[in-house]
Image: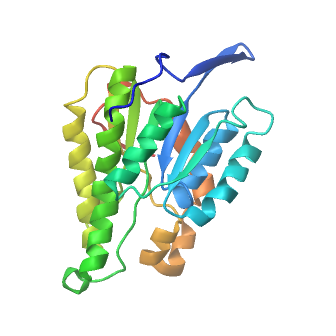
Amino acid sequence: MSAALPPTATNAMSIVGGGAAINLKTVLITGVSRGLGKALALELAKRGHTVIGCSRSADKLSALQSELASASDGKNNANKHIVMNVDVRSNRSVEELARAVVEKKAIPDIIVNNAGTINRNNKIWEVPEEEFDTVIDTNIKGTTNVLRHFIPIMIENKQGIIVNMSSGWGRSAAAQVAPYCASKWAVEGLTRSVAKELPPGIAVVALNPGVINTEMLQSCFGSSASAYPTPESWAPRAATLILHLTMADNGSPLTV
């Protein structure tokens, strides 16, 4: 990214209420149109934080913009949320996102690399090439595209937290989801390596969200996925954890 940053050092602001200062953040979340990304975005908006959301599901973004505004009703962030149609698999698409947030002076304090997909249950030799490519391009290349364009922005801003969404299958293995496991093991290794490259003030972590009843889990577990927590019940715990990350967490493999 060659676009110049605005003169402000950070987008975070503090509001004093009830005797305590609340440090409000601008949070970029990829894959925000459904599942964990959407639930987390709405939870953060409800808490007064500003959300920059992106998804390749353009048809869902208008409704999401309204939901974010409703969640922020009466708060300072009500009209500040930004949603954009972005395909993280495309380096150019992510570059355009980075340029847009700089132009809008909405530099993220926190990035949640949440966009992800999984293969249909299948033995590796029966997974079609196109399906394998989609998993790798979304989960690994998509994460890397965001790092490529947003780490320089955070470096110039001298602060930032990056959360790369991993999985329990990024630290273990299971049959019939080998492409997904491979991609999330890659996210874990990528995160630990990048953590060693970052300057002071910026941290990156790999976050295992736990087993949550999302469309992805349903594709693997079928009806038994309903035994697990919903994204909406997961989001408050995840938001609190993410908002309290510090430089001391750099490189850590964490779990909600």
In the picture, measured across the screen, residue 205 lies left or right of residue 79, that is: left
Q: Residue furthest top?
A: 19
Q: Is residue 170 visible?
A: no
x and y percentages locating residue 121 in the rendered image? 34, 80
Q: Which residue appears at 75% of the width and 17% of the height? A: 18
254 relative to 151, above or below: below
Q: Which residue appears at 49% of the width and 46% of the height? A: 29
Q: Is residue 155 visible?
A: yes
Name the foreground residue: 69 vs 102: 102
Quadrant housing the N terminus: top left
x and y percentages locating residue 66 in the rendered image? 72, 51
x and y percentages locating residue 59 in the rendered image? 61, 66
Q: Which residue appears at 45% of the width and 77% of the height? A: 219
Q: Residue furthest right?
A: 74
Q: Which residue appears at 68% of the width and 47% of the height? A: 68
Name the foreground residue: 228 vs 154: 154
